[in-house]
Each structure stands twice: as structure tokens, then as C-alpha cells.
């Protein structure tokens, strides 16, 4: 079995828990804690403990570490090499797969005989611990976790970017090789969510579907060494439109991350997050594409995803995180693709930058500035990974709640080689519950150096229209029932419609193929919730602040999967529930709120 290394990963001395009693709590209750109502009592009592104010992270010298000039995408793994573990519709429990539900619509995609080699792209990721990770060259080598996979240059590349194509299904095999004796924050059971693919529920990374060789979540039937996910890479609207669905529903910038019940913030902060980029004939990922319909946006290696996570370090420069405080830990060091204050070198030409707020709870407002703090302009083309109907030119800022994405085109040809630019965050935030004010000049998180002329002429473009959008019609809006969801605080924890999460029972059930209006309401005075709905994107119909209707900003007029509700904000969104059935969730994507129970399971019934 592939798990041979699992128990041999040394515990890292740097990884001592913040508080031994919390470690005991973690190791004795593990990931199954939410099943027992008594745990809520325990959590509540912890919530009432006032943590001392953490000292700031030790200083780091900026711009010492470099990001690679281009990303290194995940390469396929031959899952047919092992005749006992050829991907199949039903869980392969006899040979070590955890007890998941059958893959939906498997026969429609692959026929009823065994999978054939050319029917899907086959990939493997191994969840592994690395005790030699460096967030910055001034900090010691220390423990981090990653989804490790094969790339052109490295058989164990951490969190590689996946390039996927509509019409080409993927089987993703996830091995869990974390040690069951792990101590410190994070739990060694995993459930990998692919945000926000149109995925059958058993492959969605449902929070109750966490597994290790020793433990299974309440919605799996057995522990296991691995779990296969089936990513059909079809557009929503399969049943209505046939073929591979409705191309207006395409997704582009997705990300995968751990979604284990109660431990999403901790496990994602440990490092379990990466990108999944999805292309089709329109957004083909090829700026040289001779198909006249192709948009020819800047493409790899000039298509570059950037994930932002904030972290806190102790006096020795070791990452620390308090996973039991429902206020969580706010970081004071912002990592970009896992590095603190790194440098990215670019050619003087157009780039597509895909910005992701990878949490756990900080909000950002990014600006691109020059060395004199003068704001630079760019073109905003996609929000939450979905191309807007038309690009927004001459933009100067990107605001991102946790899990929100923005694709922007920056034309570096305006800058001669030698020019230095910075991406800065101007949003001040002192509490995990939400952001404060915008203040210039902000903190520099990424240095961009235009260091060379392009090797070849830049043939990429930003067309004046991008992807058409299917807006709900007036008749559909009038006919759709309204479902209300209220996000609030109760007993020190976070609730939806007055309830803490229960992954074993649905808080709402929709018929497959139905439409609804969801009324999302945050009646609080003091906190913000970036609400994420799995599986389907919605359209924001109306936004309200303090009971008064306010305009929906242009960048939110496409399809969304994260809806940031500020204090006393409410919005009405239009949702469809299509093509697949089973269990999904809605939750606050402030991962700290999410882990402290602000999540609801909802089901689609065939
Ligand atoms: Cu929240």
C-alpha cells in the first residue's frame, strides 16, 4: 500500500501545541468531535477563556524569497498501473478506498464496463507532512502539510496547479499519508473540496466525508487509505441542454482545499490548498489559439495564480494557530503561494493574475502600486472564477472575502524592464470577525519586478466581450420560492437559522432541477460573513444595507459562489439546483466561523 510512510513521519519539535490540554482534547476527540453534543459544551467553555494577546511575529527581511517565474502544473499519474486499484464507480473498499457513495452518472460517462485508459485524465495527490518547509528564509524549517503531486520538475511538488478542460473528465485519487500521531493544530483526517466545480456530491469533499486509514467521518461507511473523486468537467445545465451542459455556466479559477468538519481553518492553514484551472473552447488557455471564437487571454506561463493566506508565528518563527478559539487567530504575516513577502519576476507584456483569498479569515483590498505608492490600473475579467460578460477596464482595486477570487489582466508592457511594482493590501483588520477601514499606503505583500522584455511578441488580447451570461428571467424570479437564511452568533459560536452544523441531517432539501431565491441575512452589528454555497453559482438580485437597497457593484454582476455579507447586510440571490443529487453545504467561508459551526447541510433530491 501507498501508506507505508504514514507512520514514519517524525513529529516535529517545532510543532509543540500552544496548550497541552488542548492537545489532549484534540488527540482524544479527533475529527469526530462534532457528533457528540457534549463537545459544544466543551467548545463553549473554551470560548469563554480570554486568550492573552499574541506578540507580533518576529521580523522578516522583505523580498528575500522568489516565486517561480511560471507555475508547474500537475502531471497525470497512471492509475491503471495497479490492476487492483483501477478507478471504478463503487468504492474499492477491498483494496483500501474509504467507504464513499457510488459515483453518480458513472455509466453515462464511461459505460457500464470497466474504465478505459483514454476515457478520463487520471491524477493523484498525496496529503503529506513536510518538516522542512520554509515560509521565509529568516524563519526556521518547520512542519507544513501539502497535497503533493507529480510535476514536470518534481515528483513531490506541493499543491500543484491542475489544468482541466471541459468535456474531459478527471479522476483524482487522494491518498492520505498524514501520521495518525500528529500533534499540534490540524487533524490528520482529510476531505478535499474542489471549490466550486459542478461535482457529484460524493466527490465534492463534503465536510463529513473526512477519512484516514484509521478514521472515517460520519457520512462515510469506512476509513481508507485513499478516496477517488470524479470531476466530470461538465457545465451546469447537463439535463436541460444535453451534451456537456450550458457553456455560459463555465467556471475558470477554482481551488481545492481541505474541508474536514471542524478543522478546515487549521488544515488549510497547515497548507492544504491549491488551484484548479478549468478551460474550454472560449477560455482555452492558449493565447495562440487559431479558433476565431477563442478569447486568447494571456496564457501559461503568463497566467499566474496567487493565493494569499495570513499566518502568525511564535518568537522562534514557528507557525502557530489556535484552532479552539471561535475568534481564531489573525495572522500578521501574509503569505503569497506559501511565502512571506516574495518577489515575482515578470516579462514586460500582459499577464493574467488570478488572485485568491485562501483564508482563514482575513479580508483584503489589493491595489497595484509603483515604488512611489501611485496606484496602477488593470482590467478585471473574472470574479469567483467566472468570466464577467464584459471586462471592467481601468480598475484600481480588488476586494476579496475568504475564498473569493478575482482574475485581472495587468499589462506590464507599460513598464520598462527594471520597473518595480508592489501588490499592497490597504484593508486594515484587527479582529477575525471582519475588516475595519481602508488606509493608504497599505502593506506590501508581493514585489513584482519587470525584469525582461518578452521572448516573443505578445499576441494575447482582452476582447470587449468575454462570456455571455444567462440571467434569470422575470418570470423565473417571480415563480421561485424564497428561502430565508440568517447568519448570527449564539453562545459564543456561529449559527445559520439559529442552528449549529449537523452534517448528518439536511437543513433544506431541493428537488433536482428546481430554482429558488435565497435571502441571506446578516443582522449583526459587528461582523462580516463571506458566505459560500457549494456546487451551483448564484446571481445577486438585490443587496441591502441597514434595510435600504444598495447597488450591486459591477464586479458582482456575474455569477458568484461567495457572497460577502457585511454588518447589517442582506442579499437576495437566484439559485438553480441541477444535474446531480445528494448532500452539499452552505457555510461562512471565514473558516474560523465555519469550524465553529456556521454551516448547514442542504440536499438535492433526484
Ligand atoms: Cu462568518
Image (spheres, rainbow, N blue to C red):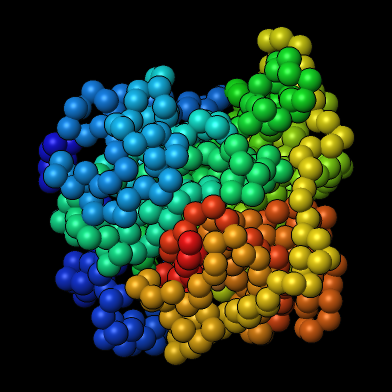
Please say if 353 is above or below 574. above
The residue under the point 49% across, 54% down is 580
Picture quarter with ligand 1? bottom right
Is 352 in front, or is 464?
Answer: 464
Q: Residue 230 location, x and y as percent?
A: 40, 42
The residue under the point 83% across, 26% down is 414
Please say if 565 is above or below 424. below
The residue under the point 64% across, 26% down is 285
Is 401 in front, or is 101?
Answer: 101
Quadrant of the image for the N terminus? Answer: top left
Is 154 in front, or is 76?
Answer: 76
Can see residue 520?
yes
Q: Residue 398 location, x and y as percent?
A: 73, 51
Q: Residue 103 location, x and y as percent?
A: 37, 47
Q: Residue 92 location, x and y as percent?
A: 21, 44
Left or right placement of residue 176 versus residue 475 in this view? left
Amino acid at each position: 500500500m501507498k501508506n507505508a510512510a504514514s507512520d514514519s513521519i517524525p513529529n516535529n519539535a517545532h510543532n509543540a501545541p500552544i496548550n497541552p490540554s488542548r492537545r489532549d482534547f484534540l488527540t482524544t476527540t479527533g475529527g469526530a468531535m462534532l457528533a457528540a453534543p457534549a463537545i459544544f459544551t466543551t467548545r463553549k467553555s473554551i470560548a469563554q477563556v480570554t486568550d492573552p494577546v499574541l506578540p507580533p511575529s518576529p521580523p522578516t527581511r522583505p523580498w528575500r524569497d522568489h516565486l517561480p517565474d511560471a507555475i508547474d502544473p500537475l502531471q497525470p499519474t497512471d492509475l491503471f498501473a495497479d490492476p487492483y486499484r483501477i478507478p471504478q464507480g463503487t468504492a474499492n473498499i477491498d483494496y483500501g478506498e474509504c467507504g464513499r457513495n457510488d459515483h453518480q452518472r458513472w455509466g453515462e460517462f464511461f459505460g457500464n464496463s470497466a474504465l478505459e485508459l483514454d476515457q478520463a485524465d487520471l491524477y493523484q495527490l498525496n496529503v503529506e507532512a513536510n518538516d522542512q518547509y520554509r515560509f521565509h528564509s529568516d524563519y526556521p524549517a518547520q512542519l507544513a502539510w501539502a497535497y503533493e503531486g507529480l510535476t514536470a520538475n518534481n515528483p513531490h511538488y506541493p499543491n500543484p496547479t491542475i489544468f482541466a478542460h471541459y468535456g474531459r473528465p478527471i479522476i483524482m485519487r487522494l491518498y492520505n499519508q498524514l501520521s495518525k500521531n500528529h500533534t499540534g493544530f490540524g487533524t490528520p483526517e482529510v476531505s478535499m473540496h474542489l471549490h466550486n466545480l459542478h461535482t457529484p456530491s460524493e466527490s465534492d469533499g463534503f465536510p463529513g466525508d473526512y477519512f484516514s486509514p484509521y478514521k472515517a467521518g460520519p457520512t462515510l461507511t469506512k476509513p481508507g487509505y485513499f478516496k477517488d473523486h470524479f470531476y466530470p468537467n461538465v457545465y451546469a445545465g447537463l439535463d436541460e441542454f444535453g451534451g456537456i451542459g450550458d457553456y455560459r455556466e463555465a467556471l475558470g479559477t477554482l481551488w481545492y482545499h481541505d474541508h474536514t468538519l471542524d478543522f478546515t481553518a487549521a488544515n488549510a492553514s497547515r497548507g492544504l490548498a491549491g488551484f484548479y484551472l478549468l478551460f474550454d473552447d472560449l477560455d482555452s488557455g492558449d493565447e495562440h489559439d487559431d479558433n476565431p471564437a477563442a478569447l486568447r487571454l494571456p496564457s501559461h506561463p503568463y497566467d499566474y495564480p496567487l493565493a494569499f493566506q495570513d499566518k502568525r508565528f511564535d518568537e522562534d518563527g514557528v507557525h502557530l494557530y489556535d484552532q479552539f478559539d471561535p475568534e481564531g487567530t489573525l495572522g500578521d504575516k501574509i503569505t503569497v503561494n506559501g511565502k512571506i513577502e516574495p518577489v515575482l519576476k515578470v516579462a514586460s507584456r500582459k499577464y493574467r493574475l488570478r488572485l485568491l483569498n485562501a483564508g482563514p479569515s482575513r479580508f483584503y483590498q489589493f491595489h497595484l502600486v509603483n515604488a512611489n505608492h501611485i496606484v496602477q490600473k488593470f482590467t478585471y475579467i473574472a470574479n469567483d472564477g467566472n468570466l464577467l460578460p464584459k471586462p471592467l477596464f481601468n480598475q484600481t482595486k480588488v476586494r476579496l472575502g475568504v475564498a473569493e477570487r478575482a482574475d485581472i489582466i495587468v499589462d506590464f508592457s507599460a513598464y520598462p524592464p527594471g520597473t518595480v511594482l508592489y501588490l499592497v493590501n490597504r484593508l486594515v483588520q484587527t479582529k477575525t470577525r471582519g475588516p475595519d477601514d481602508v488606509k493608504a499606503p497599505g502593506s506590501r505583500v508581493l514585489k513584482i519586478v519587470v525584469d525582461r522584455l518578452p521572448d516573443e511578441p505578445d499576441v494575447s488580447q482582452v476582447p470587449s466581450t468575454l462570456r455571455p451570461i444567462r440571467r434569470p428571467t422575470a418570470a423565473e424570479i417571480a415563480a421561485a420560492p424564497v428561502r430565508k437564511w440568517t447568519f448570527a452568533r449564539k453562545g459564543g459560536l456561529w449559527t445559520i437559522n439559529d442552528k449549529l452544523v449537523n452534517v448528518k441531517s439536511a437543513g433544506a432539501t431541493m428537488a433536482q432541477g428546481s430554482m429558488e431565491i435565497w435571502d441571506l441575512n446578516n443582522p449583526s452589528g459587528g461582523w462580516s460573513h463571506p458566505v459560500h454555497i457549494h456546487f451551483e453559482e448564484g446571481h445577486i438580485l438585490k443587496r441591502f444595507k441597514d434595510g435600504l437597497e444598495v447597488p450591486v457593484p459591477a464586479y458582482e454582476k456575474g455569477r458568484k459562489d461567495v457572497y460577502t455579507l457585511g454588518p447589517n447586510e442582506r442579499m437576495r440571490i437566484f439559485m438553480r439546483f441541477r444535474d446531480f443529487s445528494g448532500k452539499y453545504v452552505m457555510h461562512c467561508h471565514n473558516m474560523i466561523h465555519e469550524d465553529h459551526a456556521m454551516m448547514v447541510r442542504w440536499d438535492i433530491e433526484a
